[in-house]
Amino acid sequence: MQLENKVAIITGAASGMGKAMAKGYAKEGASVVIADLDADAATEVAESINSDGGDAVAIQYDVTDIQQSQDLVDSTMEKYGKLDILVNNAGVIVVSPIEDVTPEDWDLIFDVNAKGLFFL
């Protein structure tokens, strides 16, 4: 996969699959925006990529906040002048029987896994 001169935003990129994708994209030449609610972990991933010769920046990002979605894109455009790839990796699950899922649980699941994707 050749990603030279591409710019990617990856949500949920401070750990797990998102972190692995961010490192892989950077290894293939992409500039990567590490967008995650956990600012410290996002910074660690970006620093790791940068120390390995890649190009990454960390941005604290709450996928449920529509204004932050716009700010994330604006910050990416300001820094890199373009956006080529969006990986909507952030997600949540509630591990409990369906009858125990509360309205608040459902709102969180929907806000992160559906609404947040749409508005980014």
Image (spheres, rainbow, N blue to C red):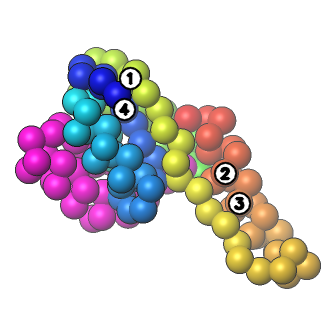
Q: Which residue is mark 4?
A: 8
Q: Which residue is mark 2?
A: 113
Q: Residues within 10 Å of mark 1 (few under 14, many from 20)?
A: some
Q: Residues within 10 Å of mark 3 (few under 14, many from 20)?
A: some
SS assignment at label 4 = strand
Mark 4 vs mark 3: in front: 4
- State the image coordinates of residue 72 (x, y, percent, origin top left): 41, 37
Cα separation between marks 1 and 4: 6 Å
State which tag comes first along the sequence, 4 or 3. Answer: 4
Amino acid beneath label 1? Leu
Q: Quadrant of the N terminus?
A: top left
**Above or below, 102 relative to 112:** below
Residue at image point 42% right, 62% down: 16
Q: Is residue 101 left or right of residue 120?
A: right
Q: Quadrant of the C terminus?
A: top right
Q: Is residue 61 visible?
A: no
> Does residue 69 belong to the magenta stretch?
no
The answer to which quarter of the image holds residue 29 is top left
